[in-house]
Image (cartoon, rainbow, N blue to C red):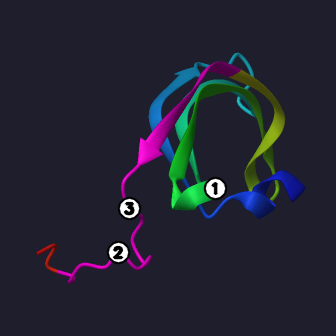
Amino acid sequence: MAALAAVTRTEHAIVGEVYAPPDDADYALGRITCIAHHLSSVTDGQITDLVWHLRYDDEYLRTRAGWRIHGRALTINAIETRPVRRLRGQPSGRSSSGR
């Protein structure tokens, strides 16, 4: 969590879900694909978006409290860096209408 201290904002989007039919009614497998944006300011006021394209391979277990993640493996398929023009909530020198 310390690595997130330098991040101004994050946004994570689930872009796919696949679940395997269980042999056991109390156990299941799933693969979740995500795109995670990590927005941060760097020198000279430039904002960058560090984008992770990732997947989670999960094991789920049914408990008395309901379904819970029993195990998770993270795979990062790609990482890219993008420039960002503006973040909501930051002063831009322009009116809110963009004029």
Asked whether disc 1 touches disc 2, contact meaning CB atoms under 8 Å apart, the reply is: no
Mark 3 or mark 2, earlier in chain: 3
Mark 3 or mark 1, earlier in chain: 1
Within-10-Å neighbours for mark 1: few <14, some 14–19, many 20+: few
The mark total stands at 3
From the image, which quarter does the C terminus lie in? bottom left
Q: Nearer the viewer, residue 99 or 66?
A: 99
SS under mark 2: loop
Residue type at mark 1: give it.
Thr
Residue type at mark 3: give it.
Arg
Q: Is residue 81 magenta?
A: yes
SS under mark 3: loop
Which disc number belongs to residue 43?
1
Asked whether disc 3 touches disc 2, contact meaning CB atoms under 8 Å apart, the reply is: yes
Q: Position of residue 77 (x, y in %)?
A: 62, 17
Magenta residues (range): 76-96
Which disc number belongs to residue 92?
2
